[in-house]
Image (tube, rainbow, N blue to C red):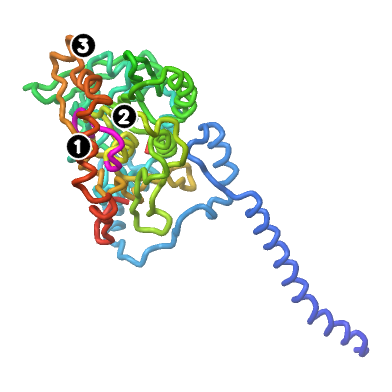
């Protein structure tokens, strides 16, 4: 073989691997730069149709946003043994659907954690969940939670079919259309209760003070939640916030200009039957009453899941006397707001003990359209008090009886209107501030406290 041919082969042998390496490196850099310029994010507040389109586009790249999916080094022989025995022996083989069994296994794994707010959702359940946080949906209009393993009504939405049919905060849901709810998750119950406008659903509920279960028939309707209503009671501004939703901040800012012109002597913020909503909306409303102070603390197991969330400066109502009304239907963001007002001695809380929903959930999309809603942290008040399952105790407990409801009397509001801005209120706040240490000193957050990991 001529020398020049051997030389050419030798040169190609040395150069081709280098060229291949450079080409691969160049392509990987281009892909990395593209992801930096166009990061892949999934926001659970995105409208459903847009989100479905986004997830479709991301399916080939879903591994970029998934958590670790490597197989665990655990013995799964019992699982496969059970699967195989069912497949070989179960009478009704038509019920044995592989995808359904896989989802059932995932749900069983999640349910073993015994946290009602950590759930696996199938693609259908995920879609309905996304619709529920959009602020408009078809159903009965009620916030549902879990207490001691029992599904309960946190609060019916004002003016919605659930309230009009007679459903009340604290009602335990015993049956849905004749089927018992024992073992149902919150999401499964919501899926059964929600349905097309005009169709009926029968809830069998257990109510304190009633010996027998009550059947309540509700006609589903289109639910549109109005976040804010306000009026002047003499020189007192009374604001009713039904939820901390996406529209609340805009509505509140629109009302502020008119309220300021009225020069109110005090403000009453009614959060009764407010089932919560968005933390961001809660913090923005709190910033109108608190000046660069801690609104809420979060405590989780991972870096970034713990820390203080501070109100902004220059709020509009920093010096206006404030009373907040709460009851057992006040949950989540309502409890965060109330706890901050109470801890900072910024106002007085009247009414009943709140619901006790103080855990933080993150929704993680999975590759087939299903999702995992997992508890990642716990809400703490500025002084370090846990909200989860404990709720917020009002400064003054005032009950509203059935007779009060029937006769449209509101002793809680009446007491608030008498107390607001008086010397009694000022003395109460000043004496509480004097006898207690600062929140951070009195209730330090212990790293040994166990915390649980929103609509």
Q: Is residue 97 left or right of residue 417?
A: right
Q: Which residues are magenta?
A: 343-354
Can you identify the residue that label 1 sits on? 393
Q: Secondary structure at mark 1?
A: loop
Q: Which mark is residue 111?
A: none
Can you identify the residue that label 2 sits on? 322
- Determine the CA span between mark 1 and mark 2: 17 Å
Q: Nearer the viewer, residue 317 or 142?
A: 317
Q: Residue at x 31, y 57 (%)?
A: 80
- The quadrant in which residue 130 appears is top left
Q: Nearer the viewer, mark 3 or mark 2?
A: 2
Q: Nearer the viewer, residue 262 or 348?
A: 262
111 lies above or below 24: above
- The quadrant in which residue 414 appears is top left
Based on the picture, tell me whether residue 351 belongs to the magenta stretch.
yes
Q: Earlier in the sequence, mark 3 or mark 2?
A: 2
Residue 345 pos. (x, y %):
28, 39
107 lies above or below 269: below
Can you identify the residue that label 3 sits on? 408
- The quadrant in which residue 21 appears is bottom right
Label 3 with label 2: CB-CB less than 8 Å: no
Residue 408 pos. (x, y %):
21, 11
């Amino acid at each position: 073989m001529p020398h020049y041919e051997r030389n050419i082969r030798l040169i190609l042998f040395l150069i081709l691997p280098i060229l291949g390496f450079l080409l691969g490196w160049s392509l990987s850099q281009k892909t990395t730069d593209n992801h930096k310029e166009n990061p892949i994010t999934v926001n659970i507040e995105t409208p459903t149709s847009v989100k479905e389109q986004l997830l479709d586009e991301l399916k080939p790249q879903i591994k970029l946003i998934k958590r670790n999916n490597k197989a665990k080094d655990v013995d799964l022989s019992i699982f496969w043994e059970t699967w195989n025995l069912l497949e070989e022996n179960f009478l009704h083989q038509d019920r044995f659907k592989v995808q359904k069994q896989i989802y059932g296994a995932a749900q069983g794994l999640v349910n073993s954690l015994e946290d009602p707010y950590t759930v696996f959702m199938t693609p259908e359940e995920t879609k309905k969940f996304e619709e529920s946080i959009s602020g408009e949906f078809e159903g009965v209009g009620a916030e549902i939670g879990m207490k001691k393993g029992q599904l309960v009504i946190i609060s019916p939405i004002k003016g919605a079919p659930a309230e009009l049919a007679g459903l009340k905060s604290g009602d335990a849901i015993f049956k849905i259309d004749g089927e018992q709810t024992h073992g149902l998750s919150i999401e499964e119950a919501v899926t059964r209760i929600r349905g097309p406008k005009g169709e009926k659903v029968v809830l069998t509920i257990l109510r304190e003070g009633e010996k027998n279960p009550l059947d309540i028939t509700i006609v589903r309707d289109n639910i549109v939640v109005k976040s804010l209503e306000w009026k002047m009671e003499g020189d007192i501004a009374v604001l009713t916030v039904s939820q901390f939703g996406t529209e609340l901040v805009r509505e509140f800012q629109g009302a502020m200009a008119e309220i300021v012109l009225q020069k109110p002597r005090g403000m009453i913020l009614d959060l009764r039957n407010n089932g919560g909503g968005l933390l961001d909306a809660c913090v923005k409303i709190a910033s109108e009453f608190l000046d660069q102070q801690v609104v809420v603390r979060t405590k989780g197991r991972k870096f970034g899941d713990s820390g203080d969330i501070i109100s902004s400066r220059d709020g509009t109502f920093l010096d206006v006397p404030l009373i907040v009304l709460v009851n057992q239907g006040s949950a989540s963001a309502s409890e965060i707001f109330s706890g901050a007002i109470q801890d900072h001695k910024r106002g007085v809380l009247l009414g009943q003990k709140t619901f006790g929903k103080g855990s933080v959930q993150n929704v993680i999309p999975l590759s087939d359209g299903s999702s995992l809603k997992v508890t990642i942290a716990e809400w703490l008040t500025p002084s370090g008090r846990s909200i989860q399952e404990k709720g917020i105790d009002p400064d003054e407990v005032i009950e509203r009886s059935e007779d009060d409801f029937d006769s449209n009397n509101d002793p809680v509001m009446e007491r608030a209107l008498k107390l607001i801005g008086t010397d009694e209120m000022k003395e109460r706040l000043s004496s509480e501030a004097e006898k207690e240490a600062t929140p951070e000193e009195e209730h330090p957050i212990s790293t040994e406290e166990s915390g649980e990991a929103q609509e």
